[in-house]
Amino acid sequence: MVSTFPSLNTVELSQLRFEIRALQPELVAWRRQIHQHPEMGFAEYLTAEFIAQKLQKWGIKTQIGIAKTGIVATIDSGKPGRVLAIRADIDALPIQEENQVSYRSQHDGIMHACGHDGHTAIALGTAYYLANHPTEFKGIVKIIFQPAEEGPGGAKPMIEAGILNNPDVDAIIGLHLWNNLPLGTVGVRSGPLMAAVEVFKCTILGKGGHGAIPHQTIDSIVVASQIVNALQTIVARNVDPIESAVVTVGEFHAGNAHNIIADTAKLSGTVRFFNPKYREQKFFHQRIEQIIAGVCQSHGANYDFNYTSLYPPVINDPRITELVREVATSVVETPAGVIPECQTMAAEDMSYFLEAVPGCYFFLGSANPDKNLAYPHHHPRFDFDETVLGMGVEIFVRCVEKFC
């Protein structure tokens, strides 16, 4: 748990307009409804139905069934202006919830352990407010409810379905509730915010035999162990030390008896980086396979190798980032305020939207240790302080008013 935050007794909500403060009970109810019925990527049917029913009840133009379970709500002020998109992800994780709360997950083995239920509630609250106050902004707002952020990725198929067109989106924003920051604090920066993610799997093909007669074998465990060590030289010796990158081997499986030399060993891992050139040049893909091939050749082993480039890095546009920062500064009244240099090696397919149009993705602090609400993301006891929901709506609404 996070335990180093200052006391949050000084968090103020005076900058939230009355209508949004009054909406807080509804925001909490929507979030808890979604939390109780979590669904995996591209299977968010109950969640999508709940979202669509709300939007349609409020008279908002709604497109459903985009990339299976995605939804786009379009709110037109009726006045000339620009088009701003707001994105929220709606999927959950394959985690058994351990929280003992009235709104705990009712779906065995599935949990909202990353805050997407909160993202969805904030997006719904923003849609509700804008639909009821069309005179307070210009142009058009598209609110995107995206499936499958946790995998295999819903942003790209939604973009391919044309959701950024008709009318064309000028900019896009989104937020991630963040238990690495105290309640109400905003983390926002221009340029790279979150890392690219790539994954690899490798099977070392050796020659098995008796543990007491190793000279008759090609020991896959020895080969794989040397590969694990050698892979760590990529970041240490092949990446500019000014830049950040990570190569992690997260799985190593081999052998089934103490006196048998394993003929195969299986490795898998993840790669993270901020600089897009590594993705464009397939740098890590090529370097990892070079090392695997070299080590295997030196031992007379063979290998099978699979490498997948998943999400590109999340890179924020300077102009839209400055808009978000100005808005956040006007809303946030917390001890930490707005943190300008907030980064993480975690990944997000919001990156595809930011490749397509200028935009900004930012963190909104949601942890409150005073209420025991500070477990990290993807933890079976993850939860957040729901006070943050109204803050998210206020920030989104002000971004709309300022941009459009």
Image (cartoon, grey):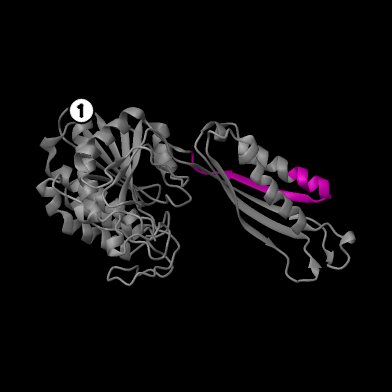
Picture quadrant where residue 264 is located: bottom right
Seen in the picture, residue 387 relative to 87 is either above or below; the reply is below
Mark 1 is on which residue type? Gly
**The one of 188 and 354 positioned closer to us in this rendering:** 188
Residue 42 location (% of width, % of height): 42, 54
**In the rendered structure, does residue 57 fall within the stretch colored magenta?**
no
Q: In this view, does 34 lie above or below 246?
A: below
Residue drawn at (24%, 52%), measured in percent from left and top? 389
Q: Quadrant of the N terminus?
A: bottom left
Secondary element at image label 1: loop
Which residue corresponds to mark 1? Answer: 81
Left or right of 150 in this view: 231: right
**Occupied quadrant, residue 367:** bottom left
User: Relative to 61, does residue 242 appear above or below in the rendering?
Assistant: above
Instruction: Residue 297: tell me if it is visible.
Output: yes
Magenta stretch: give its range.
293-312
